[in-house]
Amino acid sequence: MGMSEQKSSATDRSARFGAYVLPGRVTDPRPALAQAVEAERLGLGTVWISERWGTKDFGVLAGAIGQVTSGIDIAAGVTHLNSRHPALLASMAMTAQALSDGRLILGVGRSVAAMWQAVGLPVPTNRSLVDSADIFRRLCRGEKVRYQGPAGDFPSLRLTDVPDQPVPPLLLAAVGPRGLELAGRHFDGVILHPFLTPEAVARSAARVREAAAAQGRAPEAVRIYATVVVASGLAPADAAAVVAGRAVSYYQIPGFGEQLAQVNGWDPEQLAVLRAHPHLVGVRGSADSVRTTAQLAEVATTLPDRWLTEASAVGTAAECHATFERYLDAGADELILHGSTPDRLASVFE
């Protein structure tokens, strides 16, 4: 194989990876631009944005990133179908499509009922998610929409103008069997949660594709995105903070932690030990909003080692790539690298 062929092969392989910019809480969104430029330089396929109200509005960031990059996809991981009026969501998406020349991907999630109740928005149901997805696609195609049902009451919706761009792919973030089946039946792809083992990814991918086939869809047309927390080339304490901090933030949420444990085939009784830690007693919502990474790393010492090591990529670049291969072999079409921003992934991909 010649040098140019080797380079092309490496680029094609890198395109099966994406990476988050601006992970966690931030007060300044501007570093996202340099991180996105670095992701494209490394040959990654997708820049992912985890939306949080405050300084991580997906529409604004997608528009900005679209102007400093030229080929990399720009994805929400995730926003929500019910947090914006349908016409505003479709308008934002198609404006970003026009600015980026069709590089937008819209990942959406369900979140938890308590959050929607706290902010006064309706709690999504399976039916409302499916109907909202249909309304979004129709609006993006320039159609007039009249709708009354679980997704709301919309007597007359239409975008005044739409660019000559395709409707952005709609992905659904899912963990449990019903969510996975919903993604297979009605969405263009599924975003699997961090801290699933390769074996859990394989089971999840199979369920998604079986649901797609049962719906009369081509199973391979539904893309599987597996999220993998990565910590490579870091001091042990820093690596622990990257992996353990995020693990605790997910496992400590009542109900959600149990779902992750069940999907991985782990004993959920261990979660009681985790939640009894002094740093978590009395915490409501996500722990990373009120605790430092050092405190979360301390809490993580109560978890069995396998809950961290079997569901993340740590160590040398070669060790990380061996883990990546296990996830790709499990059926993932693309890996979303989490925890390490693109500017910290050069040693892994170069």
Image: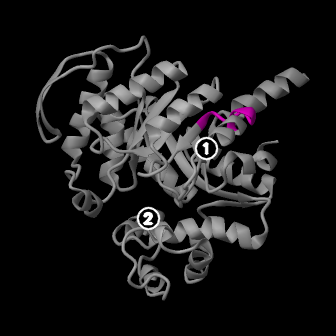
The amino acid type, in three-letter code, at marker 2 is Leu
The quadrant where residue 183 appears: top left
Q: Earlier in the sequence, mark 2 or mark 1?
A: 1
Mark 2: give few (<14), some (14-19) or many (20+) Cα within 10 Å. Answer: many
Q: 29 or 248, which lies in front?
A: 29
Q: Residue at x 51, y 72 (%)?
A: 248
Q: How many marks?
A: 2
Q: Residue at x 39, y 44 (%)?
A: 79
Q: Position of residue 74 (x, y in %)?
A: 54, 33
Q: Residue at x 56, y 71 (%)?
A: 307
Q: Position of residue 28 (x, y in %)?
A: 58, 51
Q: Residue at x 19, y 51 (%)?
A: 122
Q: Which residue is mark 1?
A: 30
Q: Position of residue 70 (x, y in %)?
A: 64, 23
Q: Which residues are magenta?
A: 39-46
Q: Is residue 42 magenta?
A: yes
Q: Element under label 2? A: helix
Please tell me the numbered disc located at residue 260: 2
Quarter of the image with the N terminus is top right
Q: 276 or 97, which lies in front?
A: 97
Quarter of the image with the C terminus is top right
Question: In the shown orientation, is residue 334 left or right of residue 178?
Answer: right
Question: In the shown orientation, is residue 323 left or right of residue 172?
Answer: right
Q: Position of residue 65 (x, y in %)?
A: 58, 33
Outermost residue toward the right in this view: 2
Report whether residue 81 is seen: yes
Mark 2 or 1: the one toward you: 1
Q: 30 or 94, which lies in front?
A: 30
Question: In the shown orientation, is residue 153 left or right of residue 10?
Answer: left
Q: 107 or 264, which lies in front?
A: 107
Please tell me the numbered disc located at residue 283: none
